[in-house]
Amino acid sequence: MVWVGPFARGAGPFESARQLPRCAARVPDMTGVKRLGIVSVAFGTECTYPEAGRRAAELGFDHIDIGLDRLVGEEPELALPIGDRIGSTPRTGCTVRPPRKCTWEEGVAFLRQQPGIRVEPGPASLLDTAESIRAMCEEVPGLRLTLDTGWSVYCGFDPLEVADLVGHLQLRQAKPGTPQMHIDEEGDVDFPAVFAGFAAIGYQGLFSVEYFNLPDLKLPLEDPVGWSVDLMHRVRPMITA
């Protein structure tokens, strides 16, 4: 996930969870190959979640991941199950982005606020290497990852180095210095190896394709939805029950 919430704009790392809208962290009941979704940011930050869910369903995705920081009030009814909820404050059963402008000790305290959370490693954060990720998971009991294959290789480590810690896997082709690449380009994400490796350890979580057009963050992309669909069709046969 690309972080565009309050913390990315400079809010403190200990913003109260009470400021976020209420949500129930329901896990969609999907088995077998019905595990491939899309992150809503692909449809643009101005697209409503009901509209994004409708479009994702029409395109053939199985679920959609949404950002909590954009919600006002209760969650709307969507055409697809919600695979993940991503926000700027730790919430049980949801994903939080890692602290950026803080010390290691502050980051540990931040992630210990709520049990049963996932954190998404990424560049310019405390969690941008396999070693720092493992160290944080040792410091925070029960902490799991929402791992983005694109940010992993962008930061210089193989997603399989931390596969045993992953609770949700985001999919994107990339390489160091290039955070978004089309599936037909020669990036550093070896998708057959990634899916085989995760299957070998018995991974039962969901997969979510994520591309984005965020020029304000120097992450422009002309057709994030089209690239997401192309990646979906390429990797779906790789997903085993």
Image (cartoon, grey):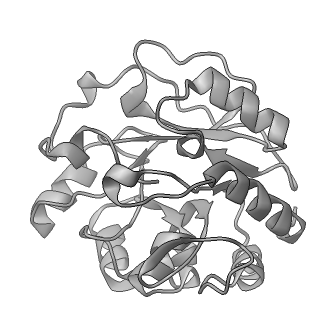
Viewer-closest of 225 and 192: 225
**Would you say residue 239 is visible in this rendering?**
no
> Against 169, is 45 above or below?
above
Residue 67 in the figure: left or right of residue 3: right
Quadrant in the picture for residue 78? top right
Q: Residue at x 34, y 85 (%)?
A: 131
Query: How far across and down, in percent of the image, does residue 68 sit?
Result: 42, 32
> Against 182, is 17 above or below?
above
**Number of marks in picture:** 0
Viewer-closest of 193 and 47: 47
Q: Residue at x 57, y 56 (%)?
A: 211
Query: How far across and down, in percent of the image, does residue 111 sit?
Result: 27, 53
Query: How far across and down, in percent of the image, does residue 219 sit?
Result: 42, 60
Residue extending farthest front: 222
Q: Residue at x 39, y 53 (%)?
A: 215
**Would you say residue 9 is visible in this rendering?**
yes
Quadrant assignment for the C terminus = bottom right
Query: How far across and down, in percent of the image, does residue 97 sit?
Result: 35, 53
Residue 123 in the figure: left or right of residue 53: left
Q: Residue at x 83, y 68 (%)?
A: 234
Viewer-closest of 35 and 188: 188
